[in-house]
């Protein structure tokens, strides 16, 4: 029988403080995107984004320090990261501040990772955890987008360019893991 996520995620894991941070980041996704689209909302979007990125720094550390690494967290954390980073990329691209090709490339990469993870789960009942190059990419993109929000696009572009290598390598890393897991 195909794997069902509800068989592997314990709802009691919602009580873990680390998962609260991931849920908060998920809730901040539409708030930051709306703020960025509003005239004069740039500073609010900057503050919201900084808070979201801080939650990303603390959720994993907190989960490990408390012995509360959970299947729910393994899903919520990377999903929150991808939704937040992609919504910022799309909002910045819509404003003409971030190259549209980059936003599309990032979105395609992350959709491929999510679909691949879902296929692995369906076939092997295994949750694919974030890879270290993916975490590096997320950190570089997050800081890059903060520079864009700070009206420092020169620094934002530099970090964006720097993020291309780990972004491509992380896709390769996820692809290799996907192939190995699917071959089984």
Image (tube, helix red, strand yellow):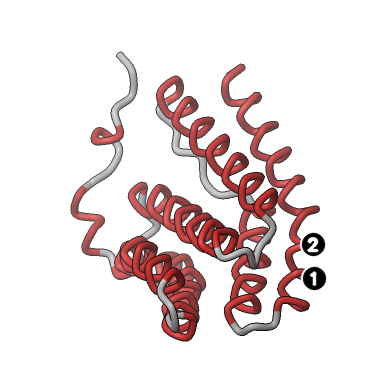
- x%, y% of residue 26? 35, 61
Image position of 174 (left or right of 30): right
Residue 74 lies, with reference to residue 140, above or below; the image says: above
Q: Residues within 10 Å of mark 2 (few under 14, many from 20)?
A: some
- x%, y% of residue 168? 75, 45
Image position of 8 (left or right of 181): left
Circle 1/circle 2 CB separation < 8 Å: yes
* Towards the viewer: 99 or 19: 99
Q: Residues within 10 Å of mark 1 (few under 14, many from 20)?
A: few
Residue 72 lies, with reference to residue 146, above or below; the image says: above
- x%, y% of residue 125? 40, 27
Q: What label does residue 158 carry, if any?
A: 1
Secondary element under disc 1, as helix, strand or loop, is helix
Residue 67: in sight, yes or no? no
Image position of 66 (left or right of 89): left
Residue 112: in sight, yes or no? yes
Residue 114 lies, with reference to residue 60, above or below; the image says: above
Q: Residue at x 44, y 83 (%)?
A: 40
In the picture of the structure, the residue carrying the numbered disc 2 is 161
Q: Residue at x 42, y 50 (%)?
A: 74
Q: Residue at x 40, y 74 (%)?
A: 38
Quarter-of-image position of residue 73: bottom left
Viewport quadrant of the C terminus: top right
């Amino acid at each position: 029988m195909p794997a069902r996520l509800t068989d592997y995620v314990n709802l009691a894991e919602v009580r873990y403080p680390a998962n609260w941070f991931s849920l908060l980041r998920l809730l901040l996704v539409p708030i930051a995107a709306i703020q960025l689209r509003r005239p004069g909302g740039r500073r609010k979007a900057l503050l919201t984004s900084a808070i979201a990125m801080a939650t990303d720094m603390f959720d994993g550390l907190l989960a490990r320090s408390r012995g509360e690494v959970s299947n729910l967290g393994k899903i919520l954390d990377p999903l929150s990261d991808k939704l937040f980073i992609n919504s910022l990329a799309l909002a910045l691209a819509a404003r003409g501040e971030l190259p549209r090709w980059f936003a599309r490339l990032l979105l395609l990469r992350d959709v491929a990772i999510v679909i691949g993870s879902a296929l692995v789960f369906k076939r092997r009942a295994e949750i694919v955890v974030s890879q270290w190059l993916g975490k590096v990419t997320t950190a570089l993109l997050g800081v890059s987008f903060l520079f864009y929000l700070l009206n420092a696009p020169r620094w934002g572009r530099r970090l964006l360019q720097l993020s291309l290598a780990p972004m491509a390598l992380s896709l390769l890393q996820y692809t290799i893991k996907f192939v190995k897991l699917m071959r089984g």
